[in-house]
Image (tube, rainbow, N blue to C red):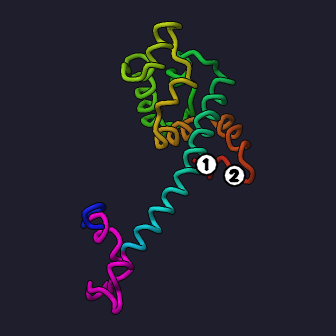
Amino acid sequence: MLTDIGYFSLIGGYKSPFTDPMTRKYTDNTTFEDVVALYHFDEELRQLTFSYLIKVEQKIRQLIADSFCAYYGESQSHYLNPANYNPSPRLASDITRLISILNYNANQNNEKQYLIHQRRTYGNVPLWVTTKILTFGQLSKFYCVLQHRQQSAISKAYDNVSERSLG
């Protein structure tokens, strides 16, 4: 197990429940197998959680693009315009950062063929294409800088979820 997982990842990451915080020594009757079992439990939990997180991420990605495009259209000039986001001054730097990421992906990113194709073929990379490359964290920031009416439209796609709880 140590060869496969590594000491730091296994022991360093999973020994805490089996040690006394005052003495930093293992509690009585703790075995190596206890630590390994906790590691495997965590691994299974991560896999289960990740499978649902992927579905949530894909849905949020599409809802953000659909909601934004419903108000402003799919032209990249619309999602690169700071005026089309929440006007709160406290969000200005987040909006600037997001637009910078979107601008790079729409106009300069040469790693993803689907971006290059849209740019060359249509002279425009729609938001629903650009959001495909955003990380979950970037999508979360995107949601937070949307105008309230767009956040409301997105939150309605989930039962018993408010705009605020999605942010």
Q: Are marks 2 and 1 in contact (CB under 8 Å)?
A: yes
Name the spot of residue 24 as percent of width and height, x first. 26, 84
Q: Residue at point 41% right, 28% down?
A: 101
Residue 103 falls left or right of residue 125: left
User: Does residue 25 lie above or below 115 as drawn?
Assistant: below
The crowding category of the residue bearing disc 1, from other C-alpha atoms within 10 Å (few below 14, some 14 to 19, many at least 20), is some
Q: How many marks can you see?
A: 2
Element marked by disc 2 = loop
For the residue pair 128 and 165, the one nearer the viewer reads as 128
User: Mark on residue 161?
Assistant: 2
Residue position marked by numbered label 1 in the rendering: 166
Q: Which residues are magenta?
A: 8-35
Q: Is residue 31 magenta?
A: yes
Tag 1: amino acid: Leu
User: Does residue 49 lie above or below 132 as drawn?
Assistant: below
Residue 59 falls left or right of residue 37: right
User: Does residue 43 lie above or below 18 as drawn?
Assistant: above
Name the spot of residue 160 as percent of width and height, x first. 73, 54
The crowding category of the residue bearing disc 2, from other C-alpha atoms within 10 Å (few below 14, some 14 to 19, many at least 20), is few
